[in-house]
Image (spheres, helix red, strand yellow):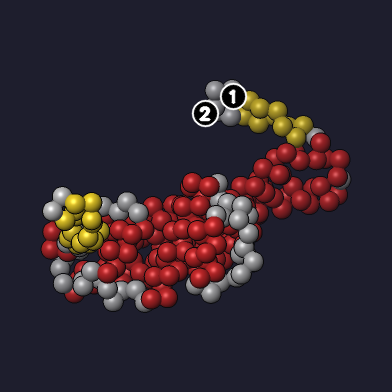
Amino acid sequence: MEIPKNIPKIIKKIEENKKRLRLLEAILWRYCLTPFKKEFSRDASLRNQGAIINLPNAEVRQSKITKGEIYTLLGEVSAELPENHLIRLCSLFENLINEILKIDSFSIYKKDQVYQKILGLPIKIKRYKKERLKEIWSFSDIESFFKDKKTEKILSGEEMKELKLIYLTRNNYIHRGGLVDSKWIKYYEGIGKKKDAKEGELVRKVFEDFFPEVEKWNGLIIEVSRRIENRIKEI
């Protein structure tokens, strides 16, 4: 099958996303954090030195701030880079799948559980309703995508577990400000990960080093995206 032009473009963005994370971190440390750190090590009082920052796009065009406050804020930006990167990564991956779902000859079907009354009585039996998957709304839709006969061999069982962890982590950043909940901990421990995660703890604190973990996740999604592209070519 001939691949629509926008699909390779999205895969390229997913690949570039990993480079983007490294580049932004390098820029922050090379041109911002390291110079401040060296300056403060020579004279700690410089932390309190005032500075005026021009804000050309803001309502108030100038802001007064100390060098110490700038350094602290840049450190927070550096710490938050992996989580912002993760949100962007998942959005790109969903965009890729949504574009693939538009291909008529690559239609994917999901089975939704529905309940049906028997003879009007309040007794319900579970049955499945087969429906074409048109857009990704949740991780269950992603699971449906990879359970279809066309795609079921793209991911291994372990890779699917890791992909679910990626999305649960992304969701915690979107809905809980990056704090882990009991659902995340139960899944995290259930797939054999570290056992001492605490509810309310920052996700990035659970991992020994969150930056390379997100890099690894980006690598997995790059590999999966390439496999999907090859699978489309085979059909």
**Numbered disc 1: secondary structure:** loop
In-image side of 83 versus 123 (left or right): right
Residue drawn at (41%, 56%) of the image: 90
Viewer-closest of 65 and 131? 131
Residue drawn at (52%, 64%) of the image: 186
Which label is found at residue 57?
Answer: 2
Which of the 4 image quarters holds residue 116? bottom left
Residue 193 % position (x, y): 56, 71
In-image side of 63 versus 102 (left or right): right
Q: Residue furthest top?
A: 60
Amino acid marked by disc 1: Arg
In this rendering, the answer to whether 209 lies above or below 38 is below
Which label is found at residue 97?
Answer: none
Residue 6 % position (x, y): 25, 55
In this rendering, the answer to whether 223 lies above or below 9 is below
**Numbered disc 2: secondary structure:** loop
Q: Quadrant of the N terminus?
A: bottom left
Amino acid marked by disc 2: Asn
Which of the 4 image quarters holds residue 194? bottom right
Viewer-closest of 224 and 171? 171
Viewer-closest of 122 and 82? 122
Whether residue 219 is visible, yes or no, is no
Q: Residues within 10 Å of mark 2 (few under 14, many from 20)?
A: few
Q: Residues within 10 Å of mark 1 (few under 14, many from 20)?
A: few
Q: CA distance from mark 1 to mark 2?
A: 7 Å
Which of the 4 image quarters holds residue 64? top right
In this rendering, the answer to whether 221 lies above or below 72 is below
Residue 25 % position (x, y): 59, 55
Residue drawn at (34%, 73%) of the image: 155
Q: Quadrant of the C terminus?
A: bottom left
Check disc 1 and report the residue beneath it. Answer: 61
